[in-house]
Image (spheres, grey):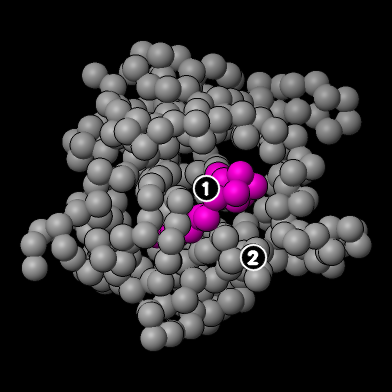
Amino acid sequence: MSTTDTPVSRRLAGVKRILVVLAGKGGVGKSSVSAQLALCLHKAGKRVGVLDIDLTGPSVPRMLGLDGNGVHQSSMGWVPVYADGSTARLACMSVGFLLKRREDSVVWRGPKKNAMIRQFLSDVAWGQLDYLIIDTPPGTSDEHLSMMEHLAPVADRMSAIIVTTPQAVALADAAKCLSFTRAVSLPVLGLIENMSGYVCPCCGEVSNVFSTGGGQEMARREGLTFLGSLPVDTELVTLLDAAEGAQADVSVEDQQAEFPLLHRYERTASFKLFHQAIGTLLQAPEAQLGASSGP
């Protein structure tokens, strides 16, 4: 078997693009960005998979309303869980589906983490996807190195999005993420400045809780594409935090929608802003995925 013909490369043969979502520190909204990215791409008519390799803190299942689901085996491999029901255009896989209880901790050493990531990449029956979004843990750790090692045969289809907040401490850690991408030759599509201001739901006044503009300045300084600024949106927080039980308190119109979570997300202030932020990504030709991540 050649170095480009591996179980992972064969399994991902039908995946056109792989987007790795990175953040230098926890709490900057990396997983919410991954979830919004998946929802916006689904809205654009794309077939999307979300792989959550944040093994010790899996949050994507809850954000997509999939808590409580389990992993099923088929003749083709592990079957991902679909967030959009019978439409089956938004698939998800996470260690959260393997836990007996949401509160159970994952206490694994590096080799077991490596084995889990390899299994996710080689055994999940993703099928044909336009995008596979990989939600990673904060920082640069064993999971990132394992991911890059297993995805080496499909590196030409990979690129990254870096998420930060505007304050200096988050930007310093985001710079370490950028250093990692350059060390492993992972192209960076752009940088998102999350939590850039807080919009008061009552009066609409914007307060710069974490300052503002730091991400844009970092992108300019490092030669990165600045994808946009996203404020704290209380509607989005409520939606993603309560996605699992969302059906209990939504309108009849929402419940009857083909994809209720997406239907509700489209009415948030974040949807329009995020859709604008990833406009560059949606319009980028395949060749641009290999663009430089800066000097």
For the point 61% across and 76% down, the residue is 68
Q: Which amino acid type is marked by label 1?
A: Ser
Residue closest to the far left: 2
Image check: 168 left or right of 293?
Answer: right
Query: Looking at the picture, how far across and down is residue 240, in whole percent?
Result: 67, 53
Mark sitting on residue 181:
none
Query: Looking at the picture, how far across and down is residue 155, in whole percent?
Result: 24, 47
Which region of the structure is painted magenta? 36-53
Mark 2 highlights which residue?
A: 87
Which one is in front, 288 or 240?
Answer: 288
Neighbor class of circle 2 (other Cα within 10 Å; few <14, some 14-19, many 20+) is few
Does dot 1 land on a helix, a strand or a loop? helix
Give the answer, above or below, for where 264 lies relative to 182: below
Query: Looking at the picture, how far across and down is residue 256, in whole percent?
Result: 84, 64
For the point 88% across and 31% down, the residue is 202
Image check: 255 left or right of 96?
Answer: right
Query: Looking at the picture, how far across and down is residue 189, in whole percent?
Result: 39, 32
User: Looking at the figure, which quarter contains the C terminus?
Assistant: top left
Mark 1 highlights which residue?
A: 34
Residue 32 visible in the picture? no
Instruction: Tell which circle, 1 or 2, labels the residue nearer the N-terminal end.
Output: 1
Q: Which amino acid type is marked by label 2?
A: Thr
Does dot 2 land on a helix, a strand or a loop? helix
